[in-house]
Image: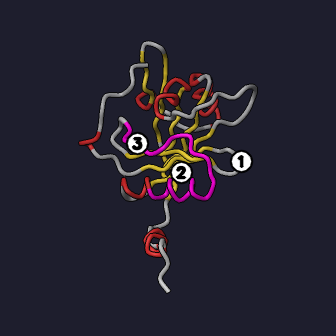
Amino acid sequence: MFKAGAARQDKLALMKQPKLDQIDLVMRDLDAGIAFYRALGLEIPESALWRTPSGVHHVDFTPPGGPQMHFDSEALAKTYNRGWRAREGASARCLLTFHVESRQEVDQLHAKLTGLGHASSQPPYDAFWGARYAIVEDPDGNQIGIMSPSDPNKRGAPPNL
């Protein structure tokens, strides 16, 4: 017997497994974070830093053998994640982003995870860098990004920080 929703479940089952695309660490003090990771041995060229008059807000590099790494300021995180909450004291602030193949898959995977009871801190939207983007929380509250490929036609101006 065919049940309502069975076709939708079959469609979701056909989606390809998402792949880890980047590791995005949000830091209170980006200069201190950059210094730490350089001391650790990661090569982070100055050309990888996005600076504005208010300071460094984004670092984009790929360490050997690893996924792409991003370091973001809290000011930047607040522009792409409506649910951003700064934590008190020494605590990890990590956003693991998974890449999916289409804009529609961002919406579908977000709906699936929130339908299972996982909190959403950023519903799907078209981000200024041109990707469809959403953020959900895992059972421990870690933030998990879901991102489509970037579409140059969907790009907008970056935030004025």
Name the foreground residue: 128 vs 4. 4
Q: Is residue 88 left or right of residue 125?
A: right
Where residue 72 appears, as percent x and y from the top left, is: 52, 31
Quarter occupied by residue 52: top left
Q: Estimate the spatial distance between the alpha carbons at disc 1 and disc 3, rounded to whole Å.
A: 24 Å
Q: How many other residues sit within 10 Å of disc 2, few (<14), some (14-19) or many (≥20)?
A: few
| Magenta extent | 108-127
- Where's the C terminus, which quadrant? top left
Where residue 47 appears, as percent x and y from the top left, is: 40, 29
- Secondary structure at badge 3 equals strand
The residue that mark 3 highlights is: 125
Q: Estimate the spatial distance between the alpha carbons at disc 1 and disc 2, rounded to whole Å.
A: 24 Å
- Secondary structure at badge 2 equals loop
The disc, 3 or 2, on the residue closer to the chain's N-terminal end is 2
Q: How many other residues sit within 10 Å of disc 3, few (<14), some (14-19) or many (≥20)?
A: some
Q: How many other residues sit within 10 Å of disc 1, few (<14), some (14-19) or many (≥20)?
A: few
Name which residue type carries label 1.
Asp
Residue 116 in magenta stretch: yes
The disc, 1 or 3, on the residue closer to the chain's N-terminal end is 3
Where residue 65 appears, as percent x and y from the top left, is: 53, 53
- Secondary structure at badge 1 equals loop
Residue at 43% x, 32% y: name it: 48
The residue that mark 1 highlights is: 140
Tell me: residue 152, above or below residue 111. above
Quarter occupied by residue 95: top right
Q: Are marks 1 and 3 in contact (CB under 8 Å)?
A: no
The residue that mark 2 highlights is: 66
